[in-house]
Amino acid sequence: MTEKKLNILILAGGDSPEREVSLTSAEAVAEALIGAGHNVFVIDPRDGRWLGDEGGLPFIRQEAGDLKTVANHALFCRELKKVCSKGIDVVFNALHGGSGENGRVQAMLDIHGLPYTGSPMAASAVAMNKDWSKRIMRTLKIPTADWLNFNRTDPLTPTEMAAKIENQLSLPVIIKPTDGGSTVGLSLVEKASAITEALEVAFAVADSVLAEKYFEGREITISVLDGKPLPPVEIKPSHKLYDYTCKYTKGKSEYICPADIELDFVEKLADDAVRLYHTIGCRGYARIDFIVGSDGSYICLELNTLPGMTALSLFPMAAKAVGIEFDQLLVKLCQLALEGE
């Protein structure tokens, strides 16, 4: 790996409900890359504002405010033109959800000719849409739970949607945004009377909602780096679901890496993860989440093209299990972006 000092632009914050998670990831990434001797700049695509001085620190957090009215991607594009003049080598995309993960920001970066970490525009759009990605899983014969997808423009009323869910999937079900992450807007529904409320919670943060048959078991995640699987991580949440609190509150979940599962089963999950990664067209890295039942059956939940990079994040944990420290991982991702891998 080259030891050249890089000029790295970190994208942080954004206008999705996962903004705070992104800021936490970006702050950790900035500190690690600066510590590794690279030049870092941090910008918020929500409105083109710089977070910190041109050395990247101190990292300045902005209040979320009204994300829909404050967001101004035109200002972001204007700032990208300035970025190009600074001699930026690579963009580290530390955004989560929304336009940062669904291909829109990737398209802007492509237009400006800026290499960036993570998957390209088309793969980002497909992976972010759980309805589309689950269809690909079915094509690849990767097990996934039965589901129904609803859009805000559908002619069905919430009551009719609820009836369809109860009749076609049966309870319990998971109801969540089709294109969301970090379990924002997600509900476990065990009673028919709670379906409509769960739909309202999900539609409050998304225009499309997925209802998925609940599958009970151990949560195992497989991280893929440069097309190759890393050791599996098992998540043991303190709640029944691995929800937002368990994900981002220290001590609320236990993580085991490598997960205590049989080698041949690890190989099966890893094979599914890598096949899904390549079929969707991912690049650089991704994390694929599974639920493993007590009888040996399993389902694939989703593929995340921009895994978290916080102190509790699973991807850095899996990388560390094979001797890749956090700063080395970040530089590796930047190099893969530069190489177009």
Image: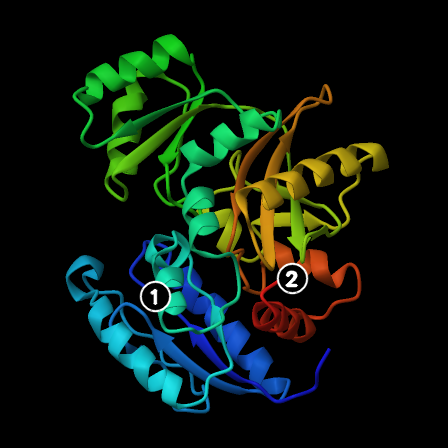
Give residue 108's mark.
1
For the C terminus, the quadrant is bottom right
Q: Are marks 2 and 1 in contact (CB under 8 Å)?
A: no
Give coordinates of residue 296: x percent, y percent. Answer: 73, 22
SS under mark 2: helix
- The residue lying at 20 percent from left, 22 percent from top is 158
Give amino acid for label 1: Met
Give coordinates of residue 230: x percent, y percent. Answer: 73, 52
Q: In which quarter of the image is residue 44?
A: bottom left
Gap in Å between the C-alphas at discs 2 and 1?
27 Å
Q: Mark 2 points at which residue?
A: 316
Judged by depth in the image, the label closer to the viewer, 2 or 1, is: 1
Q: In which quarter of the image is residue 262?
A: top right
So how many labels did they put on this image?
A: 2
Lateral position of residue 62 relative to residue 211, left or right: left
Q: Earlier in the sequence, mark 2 or mark 1?
A: 1
- The residue lying at 25 percent from left, 78 percent from top is 78
User: Badge 1: few (under 14), some or many (20 or more) residues near its Cα, within 10 Å?
Assistant: some
For the N terminus, the quadrant is bottom right
User: Badge 2: few (under 14), some or many (20 or more) residues near its Cα, within 10 Å?
Assistant: many
Give amino acid for label 2: Pro
State whether residue 258 appears in this view: yes
